[in-house]
Image (cartoon, helix red, strand yellow):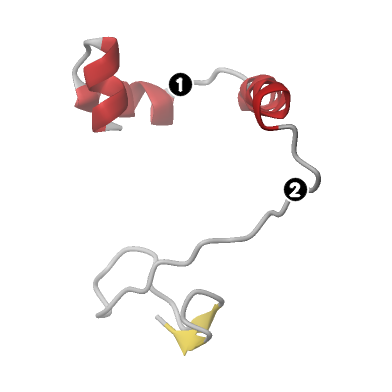
Amino acid sequence: MQPMAERLGVDHQQLQQFMTSSTWPVAQVRAGLAWRAVRVVRPQVWVVDDTGLPKDGTASPGVARQYSGTLGKVGN
């Protein structure tokens, strides 16, 4: 978020709050970005994969025992 805020000349915390708190229709934005990417990249296939971030401890937000493709095993 910080590099984007620097390019736009805005405060990165305000940009983060705007992105996470706004009620604008995200589907339209995603569709527009996908069409722009297709024109530039001309993909043969699309691969959608989840990204897991390993965490430690029981006090970290979002920590639960489950399989993680990133880890290749069950972890936090």
Q: Give the amino acid type for the residue marked by disc 1 in the picture.
A: Ser
Q: Residue furthest top?
A: 9
Q: What residue would you read off at disc 2?
A: 46
Mark in front: 1 vs 2:
2
Q: Nearer the viewer, residue 28 or 24?
A: 28
Q: Residue at x 72, y 22 (%)?
A: 39
Residue 41 place in picture, x, y as percent: 67, 32
Residue 44 lies, with reference to residue 20, above or below; the image says below
Residue 55 lies, with reference to residue 15, above or below; the image says below
Residue 17 place in picture, x, y as percent: 31, 26
Q: Looking at the image, is mark 1 or mark 2 earlier in the sequence?
A: 1
Q: Give the amino acid type for the residue marked by disc 2 in the picture.
A: Trp
Q: What residue would you read off at disc 1?
A: 22
Whole-number angstrom distance, CA of label 1 to CA of label 2: 28 Å
Q: Dot 2: what SS?
A: loop
**Quarter placement of the C terminus:** bottom left
Residue 56 place in picture, x, y as percent: 27, 79
Q: Going by the image, does 52 lie left or right of 42?
A: left
**Quarter placement of the N terminus:** top left
* Disc 1 crowd, CA 10 A, few/some/many (<14, 14-19, 20+): few
Residue 18 lies, with reference to residue 67, above or below; the image says above
Q: Going by the image, does 60 lie left or right of 67?
A: left
Residue 34 lies, with reference to residue 47, above or below; the image says above
